[in-house]
Amino acid sequence: MSEKEGFEPRIIGFLCNWCAYAGADLAGVSRIQYPTNIRIIRVMCSGRIDPAFILEAFKDGADGVLVAGCHLPSDCHYISGNFKALRRVTLLKRILKAFGIKPERLRLEWISASEGDKFATVVKEMVGEIKKLGPNPLKVGGKS
Amino acid sequence: MQAFEPKIIAFACKWCTSKEVEELQVPSNVKIVKVRCSGRIDPTIILELFTRGSDGTIVFGCPLGECHYETGNLHAEKKIKMLKKLMSLSGLNSERLRLEWISPLEEAKFTEIIRDFVGQMKTLGCSPLAGEKPDVNMLINLEAAKSAAEDFRLRVLVGREKWLLDNGNVYGEPVNEGEFDALLDEIVKAEFIRHKIHYLTREKPRSLKELAAFVGIKPALVLRHIMNMRRKGMIALDRIEGTTPLYKALEVQ
Amino acid sequence: MAEEKVGAVLVVGGGVAGIQAALDLADSGFKVYLIDQSPSIGGVMSKLDKTFPTNDCAMCILAPKLVATGRHPNINLVTNGEVIGLNGEAGNFEVKIRKRSRYINEEKCNGCGLCAQKCPVEAIDMFNEGLSDRSAIYIEYPQSVPLKFMIDREKCIGCGTCQEICKAEAIEYDQQDSEATLKVGSIILAPGFEPFDARLKSEYGYGRFPNVVTSIEFERILSASGPYGGLVLRPSDGEIPRKIAFIQCVGSRDAQLGNNYCSAACCMYGIKEAVIAKEHVPTKLDCTIFYMDIRAYGKEFDDYYNRAKEEHDIRFVRSRVASVTEDPSTGNLHVYYVEDGEPKTEEFNMVVLSIGMQPPKNAEKLAEVLGIKLNGYKFCQTELFSPVETSKPGIFVCGAFVAPKDIPESVAQASGAAARAMSLIASERGKEIVKKEYPPERDVTLEEPRIGVFVCHCGINIGGIVNVPEVVEYAKKLPNVVYAEANLYTCSQDTQEIIREKIKEYNLNRVVVASCTPRTHEPLFRETVREAGLNPYLFEMANIRDQCSWVHMHEPEKATEKAKDLVRSVLAKARLLKPLKKPIIDVTPVGLIIGGGVSGMTAALELARQGFEVHLVEREKEPGGHLRKIHYLLEGEDPKERLNRLVKEVMENGKIHVYLGAEVTEVSGFVGNFKSKIIHNGEEKEVEHGIVIVATGAVEYKPTEYLYGKDPRVITQRELEEKITRGEFKAKNVVMIQCVGARTEEKPNCARICCGQAIKNALKIKEVSPETDVYILYKDVRSYGFKEDYYRKAAEKGVLFINYDNGRKPKVTNENGKLKVTFWEPTIKEEIEIKPDAVVLSAATVPNPDNKRVAEMLKVPLTKDGFFLEAHMKLRPVDFATDGIFLCGMAHSPKFIDESIAQACAAASRATTILSKKTLEMEGIVASVDEDLCSGCRICEYLCPYGAIEMKEKNGKITAHVIEALCKGCGVCGTACPTKAITLGHFTTEEIMAQVKAALMEEITA
């Protein structure tokens, strides 16, 4: 099997309820088509996203992780949860390497409730980029 | 050339005649089947007989008011009426089906009627469904008629017709026979068409245009029937070719 | 002596307006009788496929409201009903009603539908506009509320089959029509409209040519539950059309018919139908819209119109179609029209007539029975400054019966009418109602998870792409799933009943629904499980529509796999769900209103009339806002006198505290318990309140184009109005230019009121100086509704209306001291020059620059244009997504005075649903602390943006505690806690981890 052609990345998306998740819903309402590779997990705030969740996703074989919340500085429904997400994701990207994961596999985006097209574009881009990176090297039996 | 001898089936209610089948003096091309009551005759069997090449069917029941089961003969009357409608719709001369009232006291009349029926069938000639080359289209029609007759909708209406005409409807209003018959006409026709569409789309998906040509009605009407069939789970969209949707029959439970 | 008032309201008409009014009233402590002529509520909206400008599926957004209405303990539905008599007066009416027999016992019918399956008689299905058939015993549509069958007595032959089949013994052939007398304090009329009968416009061939259909028929054709199952087919031959023409203004703007008015919604629904048709048709479809003016005047409507042109390739032809003929051999239609002075003919496969709105059929009868006045077109007569009041005290009105209008305006008016209806009987609040009782909650903590899964087809929205039966079978195999089934619409009322039954039958202790988004439907299902004795948080949703079937329409197999993954992932979470308790909080029965224009003042008065105290904060030294600058009105009222009256009433009302020259600088707290700082006269004051209403208004755009500011003869409409009023305006020749600062590349949306303003000023000029020539250069004249009358009047008075587009904007130059306007005249196709004495710019109404600050302070969103963004454009026009905060007036978008007043009343009504309650049941998703694990490190206390964590000492150990009423449930604390002692309910670490693991368990590729 040709590795890159047949490879369909699996992406976990952690989306905050008020902006990014609503944006993903809007992509649906507007029927904007994007690849099926993402599995969305809803949290109330991007500030709820524990680095442990992201590491768990990579450990379980996710080829990419998207963290999406409300736009900086002040869109956050909970005042400043997005800043907390920003700090955590930035730190996590630095240490991902130690786990053998390229930081490019983790992406942080601000997506508002009215940006359905942006959400779809982000997913499309991520799928493309991760296809180039190949499968998650931590995946059991996966090729590094 | 040998004279045409029509194949005829006679259903006789066992209370109409006291004699055994063998004792009845009828021509050899007439096969007599005794039934418990004319009301018990299954319409699909009669249609089935026609598809198998029978030239005529005659049903004997007790005269009105003399039915052993009180109203069986009346039900027979309604069923035969519906069958005749279905036969006409199928293109089969409805005179090939006859209903006669006869009481045990008039046994002589029995053979007389049979003879008359045989004569009539001779004049009508061979059934288009009999012989080497049966009319294929008519066969399809009769298949459709058979399923229509089995359909709950017709069974319920025919089953209740007598009661409604006698007692009025559930609101206590009298039911006018002419109006009811007109309604029945309409419904028999609709069911016949739908079952024909169903039959035709069983083997392969078909377009409205195709179906309209087969059924001989306007595409607009076919569309309406198809949508009703869809509502009832009889048919579904199979695929779209260009701008033409093709429909395929669903198995009816 | 006046009789005592009654705390109940009758709402006549169960469309979306009537439903909204009923819900507001019932949620504010009043008993409601909702009467509708039809066997079910939902009105015209229930027939629509999608709604503009969001393309939301109409049924999807309406169904939750239908269900909420149907199960509200204080709304008494009277279907098949009509009002036949009225006695008494405002505050104490006796209404005589008649209810047509359903021939079915509503108590006994469970809506199973077996009767309809077996009924031998077919009838034309009028819900599908006659395009299909139904049985003689029927419901109008699958989500009907109430879900009670009905016998069509005209068609029923009385065979008795249904009675034999009905297991519930619900059939009652002897049921008679009945009459009853209701005692109510006030009445709201929401009877809607009657679609124009397109046969009257015989030149278009409707009724003769099968492929000419009306817009409402086309809605049904587009609908998944419509006559053709959502396929766009020609009625003549069932073929999919390749070319469709939409003809606008059929039965509207038509002097011959006497329907001079504009039906206000048809332009947008026409565009929407064209866009959606293209989405539904698998092959290439060309859509052409024949129009006179595109009236996309609503919030972000022009964005939609532009997308239709640019992205969806819809062709727009400015022409009134002369006639339509049919080619009998093909069923195709020839459309005759004139474009650029040339007569043209074009062939189409199908023609859709955008039919207008007429007054409801029973308008005259209703008016007679109730003693209210109708206007010249037989719509309900209202006044500009009292837009929801009929001519009879105590009887209010909303929706299309006032004037043709679209859904959000109807909804806002409905809430507005509810507010007026309530204030009349505010003293009787709570006297006629019953409280909703839930069964005792089952303790499931020691039980193994027993999960029920319900997978929604959503018509064909999900089922058309995702293989729903396969998902159901898959779910059945997953651990702890003891039951799974598919539903046509999981949100429908009958399915709620099924869910409750299955919870009992299978002793379920968790429920998972795989359907649309939890953002809209979670509350409904939580309510359902609660009614079945389960804690509402033992419920979880998988979003397999918005985030699956709708975005993977061309990959059904992969979408099915994804749906399974999502269900599996959510089930992993559901297994771990724990019951949560909903905190109860007290409500401060006080309102804070930001902005003291006509909207803010109206909202303040309404709240005060309801009995609540109000803080009204206005930045200017004087109240009145925009209205202060209006000197005369199209409709003739004296704005000054009205404003003075309003200001006086507000100032004299003891319950309203007015702060002028003041500003709200800080808002903290939450619904029911806000605390805000107001800077007033240099002093800071702190106020406590239960709700906030944003009424910050809008401002006039300051033009930079057309020599404005450079030449004193170039002025804005408002400046013109000022000059005319002062008698300073003298001119022989005036050119008005529309859409200045609106409908441009940068600012694509319409400012709504400028066309009306220009017509008003043009008429005024003609009144004071008939010999003055007035030219109005416009893109589209958007005099919607009854304002069309004034457009006609202006044209009759000789005002010249000349069309221009963005490609050929007029030019204003100064030639040797003389103003010169050059523009293209499209009918004579020549460049024309005029040397006017004045050029008047219709400057757009733009967002208040302060909106950004207010939005950040309140944590509420703005649109990209800078107006406030409501919770839902269609059905929640004055709510924000954040509980307890509302908006009205021009802060929402530009609008006329009557519209602002209706919205202001609406905001007050919505606010009253909170303020009228002593306590509110809060969201149960809050943080909680495991004191044994807590090390007292204070990280959470530091991080919590709401100050919802306090440190407490207990047995010598300092640990964190959550103040539940302050906790908003973001979960930031739990993420940071080093000992994992604090966590957010319903989003615990274990739950999310399980969800992640399960989502990744299987390969998505085969």
Image (tube, rainbow, N blue to C red):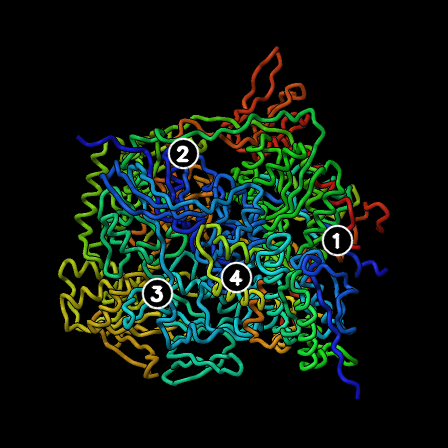
| Label number found at residue A9 | 1
Could you tell whether C885 is left or right of C733 in the image? right
Q: Give the residue drawn at x 40%, y 30%.
A: C917
Q: Is residue C902 above or below residue B79?
A: above
Report the amino acid beneath label 2: Ile
Per the model, the C-alpha gap separating discs 3 and 2 is 40 Å
In the picture of the structure, the residue carrying the numbered disc 2 is: C914
C-alpha gap between disc 3 and disc 1: 49 Å
Viewer-nearest of discs 3 and 2: 2
Residue C540 falls in which quadrant of the image? top right
Which residue occupies the extreme bottom position in the image? B1
Query: Is C1002 located above or below residue C341 in the figure?
Result: above
Disc 4 is placed on an element classified as strand
Q: Amino acid at mark 4?
A: Asp
Question: Are marks 2 and 4 in one subunit?
Answer: yes
Chain letter, disc 1 residue = A
Density class for disc 4 (Cα within 10 Å; few <14, some 14-19, many ≥20) is: many
3 or 1: mark nearer the eye: 1
Q: Secondary structure at mark 1?
A: loop
Q: Which residue is mark 3?
A: C739
Single out the residue that lies furthest toward the top: C955
Residue sitting at x 49%, y 60%: C125
Pointer 2 or 4: first along the chain = 4
CA distance for labels 2 and 4: 45 Å
